[in-house]
Amino acid sequence: MRYISTRGTAPALDFEEVLLTGLASDGGLYVPETLPQFSADELSDMAGRPYSEVAFRVMKPFVGDSIDDATFRRLIDESYATFKHDAVVPSVQLGPNHYLLELFHGPTLAFKDVALQLLGRLLNHFLEKRGEKGVIMGATSGDTGSAAIEGCRHSDHLDIFILHPHQRVSEVQRRQMTTVLSDNVFNIAIEGNFDDAQAIVKGSFADQDFLNGTRLIAVNSINWARIMAQIVYYVYAAVNLGAPHREVSFTVPSANFGNLYAGFTASQMGLPVKQFVIATNANDILHRTLADNDFSKKALLATLAPSMDIVVSSNFERLLFDAYNRDGAQVRALLERFQQEPAALADAPLSRLRERFDSATLSDEGIIDVIRDAFERTGELLDPHTATGFYAAEAKRWDQTTPMVTLATAHPAKFEDAVVKAGFEGAPLPPSMADLLERDERYEVLPAELEAVQRFVAEHRR
Ligand SMILES: *Cc1c(COP(=O)(O)O)cnc(C)c1O
């Protein structure tokens, strides 16, 4: 399989190159040149199969011959053996024809584990094959950093440096990163905010001389392999609810849009999806774009659902590429305008999106009310991100007869703040993590200076 850029001019790459590359050289994001198609029979035959079997069948066409079947199966099995539930991503019923897909049973209690467990293993595999080492650098406001660390902690060929804003992530989030004491894991607390940390990572990718030729690797959601791994649970959930013989709808708490774009890709591969509902917190660029054609940046707001606090949705570019019938020049023009000033989509692509997508946004007060209300009505304690989804699913579903699946993106114990504000005592951490607050921590506090961080990375990589 070949991968092309959403901006139309970067060279096409194969899977291995796309895995190791991240952003395309023309500033775009890589997507498959053509998507594999699943027949109705192939989909039917996945119903009732174990998660790792469905994962192999769904992802195999994307990796092609770059990795042999036995090895690929082993990496998948190892990735999902880290989940604390035999179903890997179990569903519970919330109401009439409304289901919650629990994606938070992985090592760091958020859906990002689904992709990053596999990504770490895939990177290690290809680096080993090439006889290379790689350095991962990433900035995190919480969930991505810990999931990436868990995905890479056992890798001989990768060193991982994760920057978080000093004293600005929750204690659970920090400890999920800083209590991993593996030799190849380095946590850096930056004396600044998330944007400062992000700027240092971007600066390091822009000028990699400090690494003397060692490859620098990105694990943020622009990496195609993360999208690929997320396609699986849409297929898994849908076939177990009767697809392909009946349509299914999905509601997804969204920010950078990687998660929902994976669902959209599943639908382009033959999964019968009637409707996608985008749920946002007060950082509502996706909702404004879809509802009002207001594709513009707004100041960042700190909300009770912090993992969805974004100004720009980077993966939305992939959806725009499809909405504009894969015309890279138009996507480039639109995004260049968007960087400078408020932009709007052309009529035809916007109507195309509205045929499949709807959206809703929820304020912090709304999140608190929904956590309380959902618990009273269903007995489920939702995390604040999932609460935006629960609300959007009920407010925006087009019909009651199509099963609606709301994605639960995090475990409520990870975001106590909102849960306590909703009047609960908190949510206990699962048994595997019960001693998290007593474990030893290791991290380095550094000033928000590119040079200081680069020096630290150069000195500590193995
Ligand atoms: C990252 C994250 C999201 C947003 O996912 P995107 O793929 O960026 O849209 C939602 N909820 C939680 C808990 C997250 O960690």
Image (cartoon, rainbow, N blue to C red):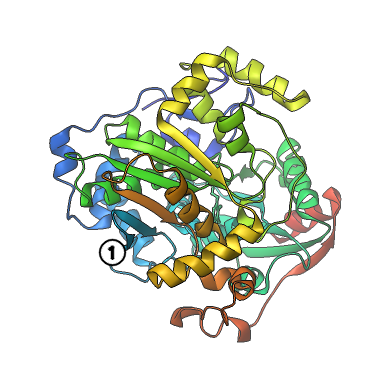
Quadrant (top left/top right/bottom left/bottom right) for the C terminus: bottom right
Left or right side of 186 for 125: left
Query: Of 396 and 403, which appears nearest the observer?
Result: 396
Image spot of residue 259 (x, y percent): 47, 45
Q: Residue at x 67, y 78 (%)?
A: 441
Q: In percent of the image, x 28 and y 43: which residue is there?
A: 402
Residue 300 shows in the view? yes
Rendered location of residue 337, percent (x, y) = 72, 20
Instruction: Respond yes or no on whether mark 1 lies under 8 Å from ligand 1.
Output: no
Asked if residue 424 lies left or right of residue 390, the reply is right
Q: Judging from the image, what secondary structure is the residue with disc 1 in?
A: loop
Say which quadrant the N terminus sits in: top left
The residue that appears at 47% across and 36% down in the rendered structure is 358
On screen, residue 232 versus residue 210, left or right, reads: left
Q: Is residue 408 above or below residue 65?
A: below
Task: Look at mark 1 in the image and give the residue it sits on.
Answer: 87
Q: Residue at x 17, y 55 (%)?
A: 48
Find residue 247 and report its horizontal and vertical position in percent.
25, 39
Q: Pinpoint residue 356: horizontal percent, then vertical percent.
A: 40, 31
Among the 4 quarters of the image, the one containing residue 85: bottom left
Give the crowd class for mark 1: few <14, some 14-19, many >=20 residues within 10 Å: some
Q: Image height check: is 170 above or below 223?
A: below
In-image side of 379 versus 216 (left or right)? left
Number of marks in the rendered image: 1
Q: Nearer the viewer, residue 425 or 265?
A: 425
Dividing the picture into quadrants, the one containing residue 413 is bottom right
Compared to residue 148, the image places residue 199 above or below, namely: above
Q: Is residue 146 visible?
A: no
Q: Amino acid at mark 1?
A: Ala
